[in-house]
């Protein structure tokens, strides 16, 4: 027999089971029930709403690089220099009224001299247009640093006209020539390597929870970015702290900068001072991806400019390809772009389609873009010249809490594959990805990603502090090898 009245409205008869029948159903819209339902039946959603989707940003370095341990405070690597000999900003002057049209060439200060020797044949060109050239034979090399060349022109008329006389010229060696019965080439060229280095930084973070809060268990259904789903209680916040720290580990490798003063001493800004292992510790910083490309790579500003979609981008992109030809000319490359720059690339490729300018239809995309099929106006890969490019959006450049806040960086071009380098620690040539992370580790200590619990809550009994503290630490740096093959797209 059902109950009526009392704590329930007269029209409600509770049922022993969770079933909906005509006399235990509450109509929230009926008159007289609004206040009752608001007071006694507050609605509580157990499941979190993923309002920002997947919030993590890491993954870029996992796609293009690797992680390897190291034991030192510094990582050093060497890269090959160019095989052939060339100079820019050389000065050409006529050496008197010599009928053989003898000229002197002063090599620029600060560049490696002594590589051009007597008997070499060289080609000189003007930097202004690159259209005026002259071929010369080096007859003598003088100067304290062997930076003054005496040459005889194979093409006297070019120099007589004065087009190459001045300081705005370049030269390269293309061979040699000697008369009969002479000695061999004097001197030898010693191959030289360019050596680079980087240092790891120590990163820290923590999550803290009091013992009282740990005792009050509150459940919530979650689906986290690392693939975990189900019900969690207070460690939900620990999970987010861990995910945030993992993002920081990658973001620091991308954004890292070296200290301009070669190391900032610890001072009052780091307290307490007793945390220092020894006095005189310094912050050296670390060279991240963007800094490495700006220092040793290629930077292109204002891709596509303010032109109409697609109309200006191809010319800009071809200039980038011409510069890649002068570098390693690596065939396969990956483009990690902001949303606006990715759309510029889509428009650039689409503009090559003859029907693109027509307002009647667009003829590129899935299934020949039939009327009943979905259109695809995006491109994930393309080939231009002798290069293949694979394009993807880089979430880090779009997120409103990271680089989406500014317009400085539009994207980065990363060469695919590996490079051969000489490792100072191993004493041998090795093959590694162009981008890879080195982290401190030994047989007893791995600092790639450490986490441990301190306090007196949650199973830890290391102090009398009534909290559970989850600590995170990492010590790492990024190695950007062959940065001359990278391109950084920057806003104009």
Image (tube, helix red, strand yellow):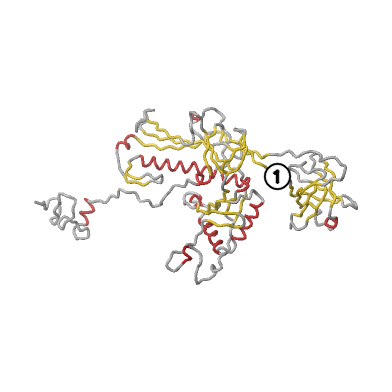
Residue extending farthest to the front is 181
The structure residue drawn at horizontal position 74% and vertical position 56%, both measured from the top left corner, is 130
- Label 1 SS: loop
Q: How dense is the environment of label 1, judged by Cα within 10 Å: few (below 14), some, or many (20 and up)?
A: few
Whether residue 80 is situated above or below residue 356 in the rendered picture: above
Residue 353 appears in which quarter of the rendering? Answer: bottom right
* Residue visible at 58% across and 40% down in the picture: 431
Question: Which corner quadrant of the image does residue 76 belong to?
Answer: top right
Q: Residue 96 location, x and y as percent?
A: 89, 50
| Residue 230 image offset from top left, x and y in percent | 33, 44
Looking at the image, residue 376 lies above or below residue 196? below
Measured along the vertical axis of the image, is residue 376 above or below residue 55? Answer: below
Seen at 49% across and 34% down, the residue is 447
- The residue beneath circle 1 is 83
| Left or right: 234 as drawn, with respect to 57 | left
Q: Position of residue 386 (x, y in %)?
A: 61, 55
Indicate the quadrant containing the C terminus: top left, top right, bottom left or bottom right: bottom right
- In the image: residue 460, left or right of residue 439: left
**Residue nearest the viewer, comparing 413 with 173:** 173
Q: In the image, 130: left or right of 205?
A: right
């Amino acid at each position: 027999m059902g109950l009526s009245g009392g704590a329930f409205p007269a029209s409600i008869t509770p049922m022993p089971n969770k079933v909906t029948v005509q006399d235990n159903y509450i109509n929230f819209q009926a008159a007289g029930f609004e206040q009752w339902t608001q007071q006694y039946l507050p609605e509580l959603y157990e499941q979190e709403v993923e309002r920002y989707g997947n919030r993590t940003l890491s993954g870029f370095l996992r796609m293009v690089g690797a992680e390897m341990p190291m034991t030192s405070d510094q990582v050093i690597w060497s890269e090959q220099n160019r095989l052939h000999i060339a100079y820019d900003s050389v000065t050409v002057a006529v050496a008197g009224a010599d009928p053989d049209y003898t000229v002197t060439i002063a090599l620029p200060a600060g560049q490696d001299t002594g590589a051009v020797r007597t008997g070499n044949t060289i080609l000189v060109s003007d930097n202004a247009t690159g259209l005026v050239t002259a071929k010369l034979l080096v007859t003598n090399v003088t100067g304290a640093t062997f930076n003054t060349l005496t040459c005889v022109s194979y093409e006297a008329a070019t120099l007589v006209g004065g087009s190459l006389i001045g300081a705005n010229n370049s030269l390269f060696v293309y061979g040699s020539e000697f008369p009969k019965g002479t000695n061999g080439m004097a001197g030898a060229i010693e191959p030289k390597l360019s050596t680079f280095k980087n240092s790891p930084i120590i990163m820290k973070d923590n999550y803290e929870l009091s013992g009282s809060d740990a005792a009050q268990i509150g459940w919530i259904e979650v689906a986290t970015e690392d693939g975990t789903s189900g019900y969690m209680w207070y460690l939900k916040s620990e999970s987010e702290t861990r995910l945030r720290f993992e993002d920081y580990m990658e973001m620091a490798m991308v954004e890292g900068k070296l200290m301009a003063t070669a190391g900032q001493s610890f001072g009052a800004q780091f307290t307490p001072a007793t945390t220092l292992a020894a006095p005189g510790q310094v912050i050296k910083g670390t060279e991240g991806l963007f800094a490495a490309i700006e220092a040793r790579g290629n930077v292109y500003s204002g891709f596509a400019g303010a032109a109409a979609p697609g109309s200006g981008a191809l010319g800009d992109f071809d200039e980038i390809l011409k510069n890649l030809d002068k570098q390693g000319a690596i065939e396969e490359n990956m483009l990690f772009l902001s949303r606006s720059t990715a759309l510029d690339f889509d428009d650039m490729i689409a503009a090559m389609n003859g029907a693109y300018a027509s307002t009647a239809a667009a003829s590129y995309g899935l299934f020949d873009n039939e009327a009943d099929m979905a259109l695809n106006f995006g491109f994930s890969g393309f080939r231009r010249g002798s290069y293949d490019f694979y394009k993807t959006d880089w979430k880090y450049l779009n997120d409103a809490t990271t680089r989406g806040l500014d317009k400085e960086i539009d994207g980065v071009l990363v060469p695919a594959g590996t490079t051969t380098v000489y490792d100072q620690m191993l004493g041998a040539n090795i093959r590694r990805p162009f981008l890879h992370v080195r982290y401190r580790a030994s047989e007893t200590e791995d600092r790639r990603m450490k986490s441990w619990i301190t306090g007196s809550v949650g199973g830890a009994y290391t102090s009398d502090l009534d909290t559970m503290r989850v600590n995170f630490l990492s010590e790492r740096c990024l190695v950007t090898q062959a940065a001359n093959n990278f391109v950084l797209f920057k806003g104009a």
